[in-house]
Image (spheres, rainbow, N blue to C red):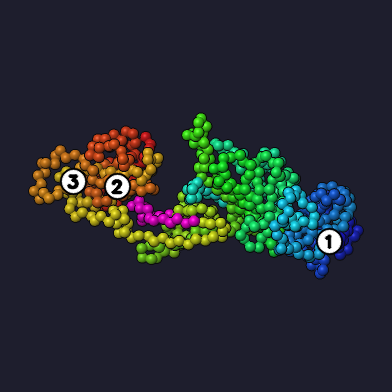
Amino acid sequence: MLTWLRQTKQSCCATACLVSLLGPALAEGQVVRGRLLDALDGSSIGTAMIVLVNPQELEEARVLSRSNSGLFQLEAPRPGNFRLRAERIGYATSYSDFFDLAAGDTLVIEIRADVEAISLRGIEAVADRQCRVRPGEGLAVTRVWEEARKALEAAAWTQELGLYRYDVLRIKRRLDRRVHTVLTEDRIYSELLAAAPYVSRPADSLRAEGFARYSPDESFFWAPDAEVLLSDAFLDTHCLLIRGGRSNEAGVVGLDFEPLPNRNVPEIAGTMWLDEATSRLRRLEFEYLNINAPESLMDAEPGGRVEFQALPDGTWIVTSWSLRLFRARVDPEGFGNRSRVELDGITLEQGEVLRAQDNNGTVFQGNPGRRIAGTVFDSTGAGLPGARVFVSGEGTEVLTDSRGRFELTHLGTGTYTVQWEHPYLTQVAYQPEWAEVRMGQDIDELELIEFEAPSLEEVINDICDGVAQPAAPMLSGVDWVARSVILTGRLTGQTPKPAEEMSVRVYSTAFEAGSFFESLDLDQLAGRTWQILAEAPVSANGFYGACWLPAGSRLIVAAVAADDDLDANDVGQVLRLVELFPGSVRFINIPPDAPFRILDLRIGTR
């Protein structure tokens, strides 16, 4: 139903006075104002999309009705004959009668909408697998598409107006190609003033060139946003159908899309998932097709996911998006003269909206997503504050609070190696035990773990592998020195071999007096040469520990390959390493009052 009034200086009836509630008229142009009302009781209906359409049903302008009052105001781009269409997700679309809008006119219109709820319950996969481009009325696929379209148009309108400021977390993860362990995870936090946190490549470009560009050396992938999914370029080149059965999630209906059979450019196929009860669009999932990449790369299952969210005022935003991509590796040892391209690993690129704000404050607060939480306890069982808990990469770390608690958020699927450290352990370069945690597909998954910090005595026992401190001193020159020093550290830089195939040798001129301790002739020591006092293995993470070294005695500490050709007793060969790798050989003298010493050795640099 339609009520309208042309605004003049002489008239102000009850309907016309509605104008004052909507604010002043625009100085130029044609304005349509009004309210969306319930046809039964006349109450206001908010958060509906009001669309101005011409007799050919082509859109001329659109605006959201206010959430609390149902009021709306839009400007027509030109005079003409129009009507208004009111769209609400989960309800039937309502129309006004057609009306003429003259140049400079302001019309006030009330639209009375029948509150007829639309449910997607009972919609099942269709047996007809016919490709339907822009399906006609009366089909189940049309019913689902209309609800998805309403959400997408609201998201595109929100994006076009640039209503919000976004705090965004962007994450790039590198997974290995076999068990999908997270190798690195880099994070960037930013504040965006752009129209939207996530914008796709233009639809016409995607239609012409496709959604991906592959080469063995470098590949590019693009994902669709709301504007692309609504575009003629996309709808004319993709089929819509309801296939179902591709989600284990209850209460959702899937609208599938796939490229036309004759498309020969890189494409996407996927599903728009809608809530069965409310008809609201939840997310989009897709996979890449026609990339012309080797099968070994496609085993990574490249694809993506986009999450949509309705805000209280009726606007829609993308709250998260992710791409799963392959990393190619060119093996020059291919067949014949041709190199072979292999899967080197998987890259996950993810974006999360942490919050969206307008001039009045926060309108959206993001979900922390997949989480790993827990507590670090000290050796007495109390929470250990100030411990750094982290995973491989940059940016994914937190400090434990006053009760030793921590939480890592916005994690992806895959296996994480969660590590921790604390100043009292790093002072002896000690790395405590870590935990491997596998995160699944559930976006709200929470895994709980606990770490127990060892006592300093346990740390020493672990570093020294239970070797008791020798009671007898050593002789350095003419002085007796106690064996009280523990030397720890790590190898940094590019090791010539894997870290666990390296070792750290400690040389000294001090030696044990042995059985002739009391009758030792000091003159016999005048020509004493350097000897290996300890050879410490190196862990996979580059840590080493050498125990019970003589305090107050000069030492040579050298990083060497465990299977090198050096004569272990010829210190001269070791010292020649100084010319090649200065940081790999160090001279030190540890005083008795500092029994713990950290010494990092730099490998692979001149």
Q: Which residues are magenta?
A: 419-438
User: Considering the image in quadrants, where does the N terminus appear?
Assistant: bottom right
Q: Amino acid at mark 3?
A: Phe
Residue 98 rendering spot, x and y as whole percentages: 88, 55
Residue 495: which quarter of the image? top left
Q: CA distance from mark 3 to mark 1?
A: 101 Å
Q: Are marks 1 and 2 in contact (CB under 8 Å)?
A: no
Q: Are marks 3 and 2 in contact (CB under 8 Å)?
A: no
Q: CA distance from mark 1 to mark 2?
A: 85 Å
Q: Amino acid at mark 2?
A: Ala
Q: Is residue 473 left or right of residue 121?
A: left
Residue 204 rendering spot, x and y as whole percentages: 71, 41
Q: Secondary structure at mark 1?
A: strand
Residue wearing tag 3: 511
Residue 383: which quarter of the image? bottom left
Give whichever of 456, 6 is nearer the camera.
456
Marker count (numbered): 3
Q: Is residue 21 above or below residue 105?
A: below
Q: CA distance from mark 3 to mark 2?
A: 18 Å
Residue count near mark 2 (Cα–Cα under 10 Å), binned few <14, some 14–19, many ≥20? many
Q: Tell me, for residue 536, which label it has, or none.
A: 2
Q: Disc 3 vs disc 1: which is toward the camera?
A: 3
Residue wearing tag 1: 110
**Residue 481 appears in the figure:** yes
Give whichever of 182, 61 is nearer the camera.
182
Q: Secondary structure at mark 3?
A: strand
Q: Is residue 109 left or right of residue 335?
A: right
Residue count near mark 1 (Cα–Cα under 10 Å), binned few <14, some 14–19, many ≥20? many
Q: Amino acid at mark 1?
A: Glu
